[in-house]
Protein backbone atom coordinates (compact mmCIF):
# COMPACT_ATOMS: atom_id res chain seq x y z
CA UNK A 1 0.00 0.00 0.00
CA UNK A 2 1.12 3.54 -0.66
CA UNK A 3 1.45 6.39 1.76
CA UNK A 4 -0.69 9.53 1.85
CA UNK A 5 -1.64 10.39 -1.70
CA UNK A 6 -1.26 13.61 -3.61
CA UNK A 7 1.71 15.71 -4.60
CA UNK A 8 0.44 19.25 -4.03
CA UNK A 9 -1.50 19.77 -0.80
CA UNK A 10 -4.91 21.45 -0.97
CA UNK A 11 -5.76 24.41 1.23
CA UNK A 12 -8.16 23.34 3.97
CA UNK A 13 -10.97 23.97 4.68
CA UNK A 14 -12.07 23.70 1.06
CA UNK A 15 -14.41 26.47 -0.03
CA UNK A 16 -17.94 25.65 -1.17
CA UNK A 17 -19.52 27.30 -4.23
CA UNK A 18 -22.58 28.21 -2.12
CA UNK A 19 -23.44 28.04 1.61
CA UNK A 20 -25.81 25.07 1.28
CA UNK A 21 -23.71 23.08 -1.18
CA UNK A 22 -20.67 20.83 -0.60
CA UNK A 23 -17.33 21.54 -2.27
CA UNK A 24 -17.21 19.64 -5.59
CA UNK A 25 -13.71 18.47 -4.62
CA UNK A 26 -15.22 16.09 -2.03
CA UNK A 27 -16.62 13.73 -4.65
CA UNK A 28 -13.38 13.81 -6.64
CA UNK A 29 -11.28 13.12 -3.55
CA UNK A 30 -13.48 10.22 -2.48
CA UNK A 31 -13.00 8.66 -5.91
CA UNK A 32 -9.35 9.36 -6.62
CA UNK A 33 -7.56 10.49 -3.44
CA UNK A 34 -9.41 9.45 -0.26
CA UNK A 35 -6.35 10.28 1.88
CA UNK A 36 -5.32 13.69 0.61
CA UNK A 37 -2.56 16.07 1.70
CA UNK A 38 -3.94 19.39 2.93
CA UNK A 39 -2.55 22.58 4.44
CA UNK A 40 -4.39 23.95 7.47
CA UNK A 41 -4.84 27.69 8.21
CA UNK A 42 -1.76 27.47 10.46
CA UNK A 43 0.35 26.39 7.49
CA UNK A 44 0.83 22.91 8.98
CA UNK A 45 0.17 19.88 6.82
CA UNK A 46 -2.37 17.14 7.55
CA UNK A 47 -4.17 14.30 5.77
CA UNK A 48 -7.83 14.72 4.83
CA UNK A 49 -10.15 11.69 4.97
CA UNK A 50 -13.37 11.86 2.92
CA UNK A 51 -14.68 8.26 2.65
CA UNK A 52 -17.27 6.98 5.12
CA UNK A 53 -15.41 3.83 6.19
CA UNK A 54 -12.07 5.66 6.54
CA UNK A 55 -13.57 8.42 8.68
CA UNK A 56 -15.44 5.92 10.84
CA UNK A 57 -12.25 3.89 11.32
CA UNK A 58 -10.14 6.94 12.15
CA UNK A 59 -12.64 8.09 14.77
CA UNK A 60 -12.82 4.66 16.40
CA UNK A 61 -9.37 3.06 16.01
CA UNK A 62 -7.16 3.35 19.13
CA UNK A 63 -4.11 3.81 16.88
CA UNK A 64 -5.44 7.33 16.23
CA UNK A 65 -6.23 9.58 19.17
CA UNK A 66 -7.42 13.05 20.08
CA UNK A 67 -5.02 13.17 23.03
CA UNK A 68 -2.10 12.89 20.62
CA UNK A 69 -2.96 16.30 19.19
CA UNK A 70 -1.05 17.81 22.10
CA UNK A 71 2.16 16.24 20.73
CA UNK A 72 4.82 18.73 19.60
CA UNK A 73 4.73 17.40 16.03
CA UNK A 74 0.93 17.42 15.71
CA UNK A 75 -0.53 19.88 13.21
CA UNK A 76 -2.09 23.06 14.57
CA UNK A 77 -5.34 24.40 13.19
CA UNK A 78 -5.17 28.15 13.69
CA UNK A 79 -2.46 30.45 12.42
CA UNK A 80 0.05 31.45 15.10
CA UNK A 81 -1.77 29.45 17.75
CA UNK A 82 0.16 26.83 19.70
CA UNK A 83 -2.52 26.87 22.40
CA UNK A 84 -5.47 26.07 20.17
CA UNK A 85 -8.71 24.38 21.09
CA UNK A 86 -7.15 20.89 20.82
CA UNK A 87 -4.02 21.65 22.88
CA UNK A 88 -5.40 24.31 25.23
CA UNK A 89 -5.30 24.10 29.02
CA UNK A 90 -8.97 23.13 28.79
CA UNK A 91 -8.20 20.13 26.58
CA UNK A 92 -5.21 19.15 28.71
CA UNK A 93 -7.31 19.24 31.90
CA UNK A 94 -9.90 16.95 30.35
CA UNK A 95 -7.18 14.56 29.17
CA UNK A 96 -5.68 14.50 32.69
CA UNK A 97 -9.10 13.65 34.08
CA UNK A 98 -9.12 10.43 32.05
CA UNK A 99 -11.43 10.17 29.06
CA UNK A 100 -13.43 7.12 30.11
CA UNK A 101 -13.84 8.37 33.67
CA UNK A 102 -14.86 11.85 32.48
CA UNK A 103 -17.47 10.47 30.09
CA UNK A 104 -18.80 8.17 32.81
CA UNK A 105 -19.31 11.08 35.21
CA UNK A 106 -20.69 13.62 32.73
CA UNK A 107 -22.61 11.04 30.70
CA UNK A 108 -24.96 10.43 33.63
CA UNK A 109 -26.52 13.76 32.74
CA UNK A 110 -26.63 13.45 28.94
CA UNK A 111 -29.06 10.56 28.66
CA UNK A 112 -31.93 10.44 26.18
CA UNK A 113 -34.36 10.06 29.09
CA UNK A 114 -33.12 13.22 30.80
CA UNK A 115 -33.14 15.15 27.54
CA UNK A 116 -36.72 14.09 26.91
CA UNK A 117 -37.62 15.47 30.33
CA UNK A 118 -36.04 18.80 29.33
CA UNK A 119 -37.95 19.03 26.05
CA UNK A 120 -41.06 20.85 27.39
CA UNK A 121 -38.81 23.62 28.74
CA UNK A 122 -37.03 23.86 25.39
CA UNK A 123 -40.36 24.12 23.56
CA UNK A 124 -41.62 26.77 25.97
CA UNK A 125 -38.49 28.86 25.43
CA UNK A 126 -38.73 28.38 21.64
CA UNK A 127 -42.35 29.58 21.80
CA UNK A 128 -41.24 32.63 23.77
CA UNK A 129 -38.49 33.41 21.24
CA UNK A 130 -40.94 33.02 18.34
CA UNK A 131 -43.22 35.50 20.13
CA UNK A 132 -40.34 37.96 20.19
CA UNK A 133 -39.63 37.38 16.51
CA UNK A 134 -43.28 38.02 15.64
CA UNK A 135 -43.22 41.24 17.67
CA UNK A 136 -40.09 42.32 15.79
CA UNK A 137 -41.88 41.84 12.50
CA UNK A 138 -40.79 40.45 9.18
CA UNK A 139 -38.27 39.97 7.83
CA UNK A 140 -36.37 38.77 10.88
CA UNK A 141 -33.01 37.11 11.40
CA UNK A 142 -33.63 33.58 12.68
CA UNK A 143 -30.08 33.38 14.06
CA UNK A 144 -30.53 36.42 16.30
CA UNK A 145 -34.09 35.67 17.37
CA UNK A 146 -34.04 31.88 17.78
CA UNK A 147 -31.08 29.76 16.65
CA UNK A 148 -28.50 31.38 18.95
CA UNK A 149 -30.45 32.33 22.09
CA UNK A 150 -32.23 28.98 22.49
CA UNK A 151 -29.16 26.74 22.91
CA UNK A 152 -27.48 29.39 25.07
CA UNK A 153 -30.51 29.35 27.36
CA UNK A 154 -30.57 25.54 27.46
CA UNK A 155 -26.89 24.89 28.21
CA UNK A 156 -26.58 27.80 30.65
CA UNK A 157 -29.66 26.57 32.51
CA UNK A 158 -28.16 23.08 32.69
CA UNK A 159 -24.88 24.41 34.05
CA UNK A 160 -26.43 26.99 36.37
CA UNK A 161 -24.90 30.04 34.63
CA UNK A 162 -26.54 33.32 35.71
CA UNK A 163 -28.66 34.85 32.97
CA UNK A 164 -26.71 38.11 33.01
CA UNK A 165 -23.46 36.33 32.11
CA UNK A 166 -24.68 34.48 29.03
CA UNK A 167 -23.72 37.05 26.40
CA UNK A 168 -20.07 36.82 27.45
CA UNK A 169 -19.81 33.30 26.03
CA UNK A 170 -20.43 34.47 22.48
CA UNK A 171 -17.17 36.43 22.42
CA UNK A 172 -15.19 33.62 24.02
CA UNK A 173 -16.56 30.94 21.69
CA UNK A 174 -15.95 33.12 18.63
CA UNK A 175 -12.29 33.29 19.64
CA UNK A 176 -11.87 29.56 20.29
CA UNK A 177 -13.72 28.44 17.15
CA UNK A 178 -12.19 30.95 14.74
CA UNK A 179 -9.25 29.64 12.70
CA UNK A 180 -8.00 32.93 11.27
CA UNK A 181 -9.36 35.97 13.09
CA UNK A 182 -7.38 36.06 16.34
CA UNK A 183 -3.74 36.17 17.34
CA UNK A 184 -2.03 33.72 19.67
CA UNK A 185 -2.08 36.31 22.49
CA UNK A 186 -5.79 37.04 21.99
CA UNK A 187 -6.60 33.34 22.04
CA UNK A 188 -4.54 32.75 25.17
CA UNK A 189 -6.16 35.73 26.92
CA UNK A 190 -9.63 34.43 26.06
CA UNK A 191 -8.74 31.00 27.48
CA UNK A 192 -7.50 32.61 30.68
CA UNK A 193 -10.59 34.83 31.06
CA UNK A 194 -12.96 31.93 30.40
CA UNK A 195 -11.11 29.66 32.83
CA UNK A 196 -11.14 32.36 35.52
CA UNK A 197 -14.88 32.84 35.07
CA UNK A 198 -15.60 29.11 35.26
CA UNK A 199 -13.36 28.73 38.30
CA UNK A 200 -15.42 31.41 40.05
CA UNK A 201 -18.66 29.73 39.02
CA UNK A 202 -17.45 26.38 40.38
CA UNK A 203 -16.66 28.04 43.70
CA UNK A 204 -20.14 29.56 43.80
CA UNK A 205 -21.71 26.14 43.17
CA UNK A 206 -19.54 24.58 45.83
CA UNK A 207 -20.76 27.18 48.36
CA UNK A 208 -24.38 27.21 47.20
CA UNK A 209 -25.15 24.02 45.23
CA UNK A 210 -28.27 23.70 43.10
CA UNK A 211 -29.73 21.04 40.85
CA UNK A 212 -27.53 22.00 37.88
CA UNK A 213 -24.86 19.84 36.25
CA UNK A 214 -21.87 21.58 37.84
CA UNK A 215 -23.36 21.13 41.31
CA UNK A 216 -23.99 17.46 40.63
CA UNK A 217 -20.41 16.96 39.39
CA UNK A 218 -19.04 18.69 42.48
CA UNK A 219 -21.08 16.42 44.74
CA UNK A 220 -20.66 13.28 42.63
CA UNK A 221 -17.88 10.76 42.20
CA UNK A 222 -16.93 7.94 39.89
CA UNK A 223 -17.09 4.25 40.74
CA UNK A 224 -13.88 4.56 42.78
CA UNK A 225 -15.32 7.31 44.94
CA UNK A 226 -13.03 10.02 43.51
CA UNK A 227 -14.63 13.41 42.78
CA UNK A 228 -13.71 15.36 39.66
CA UNK A 229 -10.69 17.63 40.11
CA UNK A 230 -10.99 21.41 40.26
CA UNK A 231 -9.28 21.75 36.89
CA UNK A 232 -11.57 19.08 35.47
CA UNK A 233 -14.69 20.87 36.68
CA UNK A 234 -13.52 24.16 35.14
CA UNK A 235 -12.62 22.49 31.85
CA UNK A 236 -15.91 20.57 31.77
CA UNK A 237 -17.88 23.78 32.17
CA UNK A 238 -15.87 25.41 29.39
CA UNK A 239 -16.18 22.46 27.01
CA UNK A 240 -19.92 22.02 27.51
CA UNK A 241 -20.68 25.71 27.16
CA UNK A 242 -18.73 25.87 23.89
CA UNK A 243 -20.10 22.66 22.40
CA UNK A 244 -23.55 23.19 23.84
CA UNK A 245 -24.45 26.42 22.12
CA UNK A 246 -22.30 27.31 19.11
CA UNK A 247 -22.68 24.05 17.21
CA UNK A 248 -26.37 23.65 18.05
CA UNK A 249 -27.05 27.22 16.90
CA UNK A 250 -25.42 26.30 13.61
CA UNK A 251 -27.47 23.10 13.37
CA UNK A 252 -30.74 24.99 13.91
CA UNK A 253 -29.81 27.63 11.35
CA UNK A 254 -28.79 25.16 8.66
CA UNK A 255 -31.80 22.90 9.33
CA UNK A 256 -34.22 25.74 8.61
CA UNK A 257 -32.19 26.93 5.62
CA UNK A 258 -32.21 23.49 3.98
CA UNK A 259 -35.92 22.96 4.61
CA UNK A 260 -36.71 26.40 3.17
CA UNK A 261 -34.37 26.01 0.19
CA UNK A 262 -36.80 23.54 -1.38
CA UNK A 263 -40.34 24.39 -0.28
CA UNK A 264 -41.51 20.83 -0.94
CA UNK A 265 -39.50 19.67 2.08
CA UNK A 266 -41.29 22.06 4.43
CA UNK A 267 -44.68 21.21 2.95
CA UNK A 268 -44.03 17.52 3.46
CA UNK A 269 -43.35 18.05 7.16
CA UNK A 270 -46.42 20.27 7.52
CA UNK A 271 -48.48 17.42 6.06
CA UNK A 272 -46.85 14.83 8.32
CA UNK A 273 -45.16 16.25 11.45
CA UNK A 274 -44.47 12.70 12.64
CA UNK A 275 -41.51 12.78 10.24
CA UNK A 276 -39.79 15.43 12.39
CA UNK A 277 -37.30 13.05 14.02
CA UNK A 278 -36.29 11.46 10.71
CA UNK A 279 -36.07 14.89 9.09
CA UNK A 280 -33.67 16.11 11.78
CA UNK A 281 -31.40 13.11 11.22
CA UNK A 282 -31.41 13.62 7.47
CA UNK A 283 -30.57 17.30 7.80
CA UNK A 284 -27.67 16.35 10.07
CA UNK A 285 -26.41 13.95 7.39
CA UNK A 286 -27.09 16.15 4.39
CA UNK A 287 -25.77 19.51 5.57
CA UNK A 288 -22.22 20.05 4.25
CA UNK A 289 -21.51 22.46 7.12
CA UNK A 290 -22.96 20.44 10.01
CA UNK A 291 -19.75 18.97 11.35
CA UNK A 292 -17.81 22.11 10.48
CA UNK A 293 -14.06 21.75 10.22
CA UNK A 294 -14.17 18.02 11.00
CA UNK A 295 -12.43 16.12 13.80
CA UNK A 296 -8.65 15.85 14.08
CA UNK A 297 -6.80 12.73 15.11
CA UNK A 298 -3.10 12.03 15.65
CA UNK A 299 -1.72 8.77 14.16
CA UNK A 300 0.38 6.86 16.71
CA UNK A 301 1.38 3.99 14.42
CA UNK A 302 1.19 3.29 10.68
CA UNK A 303 -2.46 2.70 9.81
CA UNK A 304 -3.89 1.26 6.62
CA UNK A 305 -6.93 2.98 5.14
CA UNK A 306 -8.58 2.65 1.73
CA UNK A 307 -6.24 5.26 0.27
CA UNK A 308 -3.05 3.66 1.57
CA UNK A 309 -0.92 3.63 4.71
CA UNK A 310 -1.06 6.75 6.82
CA UNK A 311 2.33 7.05 8.62
CA UNK A 312 2.73 7.48 12.35
CA UNK A 313 3.07 11.15 13.31
CA UNK A 314 0.46 12.30 10.79
CA UNK A 315 -2.43 14.50 11.83
CA UNK A 316 -5.60 13.50 10.00
CA UNK A 317 -8.72 15.59 9.46
CA UNK A 318 -11.84 13.44 9.51
CA UNK A 319 -14.44 15.17 7.33
CA UNK A 320 -17.67 13.70 8.63
CA UNK A 321 -19.64 15.94 6.27
CA UNK A 322 -17.80 14.57 3.23
CA UNK A 323 -18.22 11.01 4.54
CA UNK A 324 -21.94 11.63 4.96
CA UNK A 325 -22.15 12.19 1.19
CA UNK A 326 -20.18 9.02 0.30
CA UNK A 327 -21.96 7.17 -2.50
CA UNK A 328 -20.55 3.89 -1.13
CA UNK A 329 -22.48 4.30 2.10
CA UNK A 330 -25.72 5.95 0.96
CA UNK A 331 -28.21 5.52 -1.84
CA UNK A 332 -28.74 8.85 -3.59
CA UNK A 333 -26.25 10.43 -1.21
CA UNK A 334 -26.74 13.92 -2.66
CA UNK A 335 -30.53 13.84 -2.25
CA UNK A 336 -32.24 14.98 0.95
CA UNK A 337 -34.66 12.18 1.82
CA UNK A 338 -36.68 13.25 4.87
CA UNK A 339 -37.84 9.68 5.42
CA UNK A 340 -34.38 8.10 5.19
CA UNK A 341 -33.90 5.17 7.54
CA UNK A 342 -31.60 3.78 8.76
CA UNK A 343 -29.39 6.86 8.88
CA UNK A 344 -26.04 6.10 10.59
CA UNK A 345 -24.46 9.45 9.75
CA UNK A 346 -21.18 10.54 11.32
CA UNK A 347 -22.08 14.13 12.15
CA UNK A 348 -21.59 13.48 15.87
CA UNK A 349 -18.50 11.37 15.31
CA UNK A 350 -18.06 7.69 16.13
CA UNK A 351 -16.35 5.53 18.70
CA UNK A 352 -15.26 6.50 22.22
CA UNK A 353 -14.94 10.21 21.38
CA UNK A 354 -18.35 10.62 19.77
CA UNK A 355 -20.22 13.73 20.85
CA UNK A 356 -21.44 13.30 24.40
CA UNK A 357 -24.09 15.96 23.93
CA UNK A 358 -25.75 14.48 20.87
CA UNK A 359 -28.97 13.58 22.74
CA UNK A 360 -29.20 17.25 23.75
CA UNK A 361 -28.62 18.55 20.21
CA UNK A 362 -31.13 16.12 18.72
CA UNK A 363 -33.76 17.04 21.31
CA UNK A 364 -33.26 20.77 20.73
CA UNK A 365 -33.51 20.38 16.96
CA UNK A 366 -36.67 18.31 17.21
CA UNK A 367 -38.19 20.77 19.69
CA UNK A 368 -37.40 23.81 17.53
CA UNK A 369 -38.68 22.19 14.35
CA UNK A 370 -41.91 21.14 16.04
CA UNK A 371 -42.54 24.65 17.36
CA UNK A 372 -41.81 26.27 13.99
CA UNK A 373 -44.14 23.90 12.15
CA UNK A 374 -46.90 24.63 14.66
CA UNK A 375 -46.39 28.38 15.03
CA UNK A 376 -45.15 29.46 11.59
CA UNK A 377 -46.49 27.14 8.87
CA UNK A 378 -45.95 29.89 6.26
CA UNK A 379 -42.29 30.35 7.23
CA UNK A 380 -40.08 31.12 4.24
CA UNK A 381 -36.68 32.57 3.40
CA UNK A 382 -36.53 36.36 3.31
CA UNK A 383 -33.79 36.31 0.65
CA UNK A 384 -32.81 34.10 -2.27
CA UNK A 385 -30.79 31.02 -1.34
CA UNK A 386 -27.91 32.41 -3.39
CA UNK A 387 -27.84 35.50 -1.16
CA UNK A 388 -27.17 33.57 2.05
CA UNK A 389 -23.72 34.35 3.46
CA UNK A 390 -21.44 32.01 5.34
CA UNK A 391 -19.36 33.16 8.33
CA UNK A 392 -15.98 32.00 7.07
CA UNK A 393 -13.03 31.18 9.29
CA UNK A 394 -15.12 29.41 11.93
CA UNK A 395 -14.71 25.75 12.87
CA UNK A 396 -18.49 25.45 12.85
CA UNK A 397 -19.02 27.57 9.68
CA UNK A 398 -22.52 28.88 10.50
CA UNK A 399 -24.41 31.34 8.36
CA UNK A 400 -23.94 34.99 9.30
CA UNK A 401 -27.70 35.42 9.41
CA UNK A 402 -30.85 33.70 8.13
CA UNK A 403 -33.47 36.27 7.08
CA UNK A 404 -36.97 34.76 7.21
CA UNK A 405 -40.51 35.88 6.59
CA UNK A 406 -43.92 34.28 7.14
Image (tube, rainbow, N blue to C red):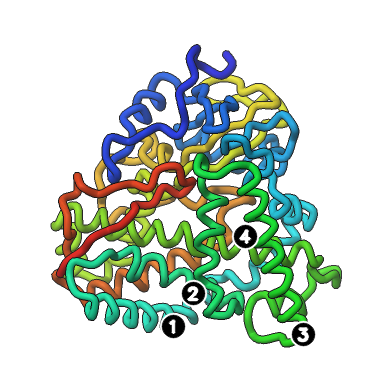
Q: x, y percentage for residue 247?
A: 46, 57
Q: x, y percentage for residue 321?
A: 41, 42
For discs 3 and 4, the disc positioned in front in the rendered view: 3
Q: Which mark is residue 64?
A: none
Secondary structure category for the residue under label 1:
helix
The mark that comes first in sequence, 3 or 4, is 3
- Graded by Cα atoms within 10 Å as few (under 14), some (14 to 19) or many (20 or more), the crowding at tag 1 reads few
**Dots 4, 1 in contact, CB < 8 A:** no
For discs 1 and 3, the disc positioned in front in the rendered view: 3
Q: x, y percentage for residue 195?
A: 70, 62
Q: Residue at horizontal 61%, vertical 75%?
A: 159
Q: Where is the C terminus found, in terms of image quarters?
A: bottom left
The mark that comes first in sequence, 1 or 2, is 1
Circle 3 is placed at which residue position?
207
Q: Which mark is residue 121?
A: 1
366 shown above or below 22: below
The mark that comes first in sequence, 1 or 3, is 1
Nearest the viewer among 168 and 48 is 168
Task: For marks 4 and 2, give the CA distance.
Answer: 15 Å
For discs 1 and 2, the disc positioned in front in the rendered view: 2
The mark that comes first in sequence, 4 or 1, is 1
Circle 4 is placed at which residue position?
239
Task: For marks 4 and 1, give the CA distance.
Answer: 23 Å
Task: For marks 3 and 4, give the CA distance.
Answer: 22 Å
**Dots 4, 2 in contact, CB < 8 A:** no
Circle 2 is placed at which residue position?
154
Q: Residue at horizontal 72%, vertical 29%?
A: 73
Task: For marks 1 and 3, give the CA distance.
Answer: 27 Å
Task: For marks 2 and 3, give the CA distance.
Answer: 23 Å
- For residue 339, what is the image quadrant? bottom left
Amino acid sequence: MTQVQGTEPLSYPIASPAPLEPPPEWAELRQTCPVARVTLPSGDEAALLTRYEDVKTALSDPRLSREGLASPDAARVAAGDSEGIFSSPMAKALNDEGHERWRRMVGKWFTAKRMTALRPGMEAMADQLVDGMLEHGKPADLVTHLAFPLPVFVICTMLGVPEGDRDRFKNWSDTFLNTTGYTRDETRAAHEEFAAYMSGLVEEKRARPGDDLLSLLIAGADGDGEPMSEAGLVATGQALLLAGHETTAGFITMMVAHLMADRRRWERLLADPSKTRLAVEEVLRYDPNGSGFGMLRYVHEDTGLSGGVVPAGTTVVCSMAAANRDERAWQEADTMDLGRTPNPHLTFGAGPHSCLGQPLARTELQAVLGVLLRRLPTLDLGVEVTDLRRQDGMLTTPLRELPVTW
